[in-house]
Image (tube, rainbow, N blue to C red):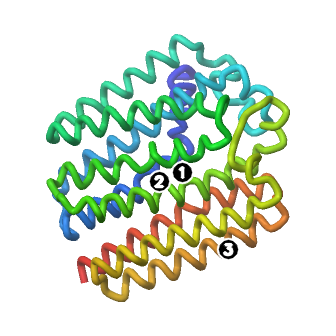
Amino acid sequence: MNKLNSYWRLMRADRPIGTYLLAWPTLWALLIAGAGNPPLKVVVIFMLGTFLMRSAGCVINDFADRNLDGHVERTKLRPLAAGEVNSTEAILLFFGLLILAFLLVLQFNTQTIMLAFAAAGVASLYPFCKRWTQLPQVVLGIAFSFGILMAFSALNNDQWWLAGGLFIANIVWTIAYDTEYAMADRADDLKIGIKSTAILFGRYDKLIIAALQLVTLIILALLWHQLNVQWYAWVGLIAAACLFGYQHWMIRERAPKACFQAFLHNHYVGMVIGVSLALHYWY
């Protein structure tokens, strides 16, 4: 049971924020691609796949950082860093999760399956990008946005301009919130040589985060205009803007714990946009 608990924590299943941040944009896409009525079976498969792929991403991330996490205050007790799980077990768990996700995606068409392979490749690449680029958050954003393209593909919706707009908006949003996350670890990352946008942006971090959030809202507003959405969806965007503003109040002093809390707060951004979209279609 102790070993199973270690695997569970290695998958970060006890901390579902990553699953939420991966799931919400996918749900946006399913709602739009399915005109508000995506088949329940498709939604369930996508949500299970979201959990599995996020879990696999956490496992390979911790495998890549197994010799570094012990030097970071926030991550030193992770199962691999603490010696609760060895590298072989982590790799076996990673491939086991990928196989389960692959079995799920086999329910869909060939295009969706190919997109799933691309998503898995980018997700596997992300943890290693922190060694050679100061923009690993861009890679994470791409990995976290493949669910949008897969949703349109699985529902045979050929409005790729809509899918592309959501894809870009989600990448930009991901860079913003993962920079907040990286701000929490910036001091430790500088010591051990990990690269991030928080380090790259330096004293302009808050300004650039604000600009990225604004771009996200502008892209979504343009898409909402093209979709001719009802007022519910516009209220959702206004609420998201207010939540972004609250995050800036949280990170105003760049305190690590506050930056991490601001990162967690993005769950509510995804939620209000998703709920407002659902209201648009259902009422």
The residue carrying mark 1 is: 17
Residue 33: x and y in percent read 23, 62
The structure residue drawn at horizontal position 23% and vertical position 30%, both measured from the top left corner, is: 103
Nearer the viewer's eye, disc 1 or disc 3? 3
Under circle 2, the secondary element is helix
Q: How far apart are marks 1 and 3 (CA)?
A: 18 Å
Q: How far apart are marks 1 and 2 (CA)?
A: 5 Å
Residue 216: x and y in percent read 51, 67
Under circle 3, the secondary element is helix
Q: Decide: marks 1, 2 in contact (CB < 8 A)?
A: yes
Marker disc for residue 20 = 2
Asked if residue 26 is positioned above or below residue 138 in the image, the reply reads below
Identified by mark 1, the residue type is: Ile
Residue 38: x and y in percent read 19, 61
Q: How many marks?
A: 3
Mark 2 crowdedness (10 Å alpha carbons): few <14, some 14-19, many ≥20: many
Under circle 1, the secondary element is helix
Marker disc for residue 246 = 3
Quarter placement of the C terminus: bottom left
Q: State the image quarter where residue 247 is shown.
A: bottom right
